[in-house]
Image: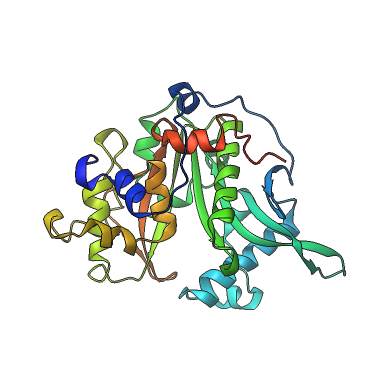
Amino acid sequence: MRSGLFSPKKLVQKFSPVARFKAATPAAITQPGSSVAFKPGHSFGRIGALEVRIAKGSREIRKAQQLRYHVFYEEMSAIADAQTLATRRDSDPYDAYCDHMLVVDHSSLKRNKIGQLKPEIVGTYRLLRQEVADRHDGFYTAGEFAIQPLIDANPGKRFLELGRSCVLKPYRNKKTVELLWHGIWSYVLMHNIDVMVGCASLTGTDPQQLATQLSFLHHTAAAPDAWSVSALPEQYVNMNILPAEDLNPKEALRALPPLVKGYLRLGAFIGDGAVIDHQFGTTDVLIILPVSELNSRYVNYYGADASRYTS
């Protein structure tokens, strides 16, 4: 059910502060730009001192991993193994072949190990394109959700996995989030991406304590049959805990993490079933966001050619 009182787009627009956008033409939504090669460090745009770009190399990737460690392990409740504790970096094998999108603050300079002043990395998103995943170990998301049948059913579409998103606490504001999504939209256009997927996390591992959030997502944003994906059977957690008539839409929406609300605002679907991630202390839901379903206001705001914050 995606219309009427429980439409997530309408609820987010009603109860969340959203910029006023003009309508976009359908062509701007369904016809991404041509693929453009870019080098490490490629800049997608700026807002004042903040810039969004791809990591320049291994040193910046390590800085992004340190940021992830700070947010996931020190600020949140992730459980670190010995290597993670020793390095104070959140890392896994996928980092080696993903693109790492960064937000850097040019007004906050930090000295590196050789004494050079470098802008501070304050936000990051990990991006994994389908053709890259196919050459390595597949998508990270496949460890929790059965996404391969969906990919196989759409052989002409290009998938992009979004993951490991985090922002330094003082920068968790509209400007930083806008810049990250401007960068993602630019990346989508450059690589002719058709579908974005990824896990989004709710804090906590007890589904009963998350019943309002999980049930709201189940009743209002469940993927239609053409885009339906289920959690792996051995990890499947039922999201249909509370009946729709027992939910207060405004309260349920308020309880959702900002990232999940942002995905709903964009027009995302939610997969069937959640997965408990004990290491990170979260309950994960699957985000499925076909480019054809992107909210037209979002597309028009950033520009059909992603030119709004171009450097």
5 over 193 or under it: above or below: below
In percent of width and height, residue 5 lies at 20, 46
Q: Residue furthest right?
A: 115
244 or 235, nearer to the observer: 244
Q: How is the image coloured?
A: rainbow
User: Looking at the image, which residue is at 21% across and 50% down?
Assistant: 219
Placement of 195 over or under 17, stated as above or below:
above
Task: Give the quadrant of residue 113.
Answer: bottom right
Residue 171: % across, % down? 59, 63
User: Residue at 24% across / 47% down in the picture?
Assistant: 220
Q: 50 left or right of 179?
A: right
Q: Position of residue 153 (x, y in %)?
A: 35, 30
In this view, the residue in front, 88 or 46, is 46
In the rendered image, the vertical position of residue 97 relative to residue 243, given as above or below: above
Instruction: Identify the residue at horizontal 54%, vertical 63% (top origin).
Output: 172
Across and down, in percent, residue 234 comes to: 28, 58
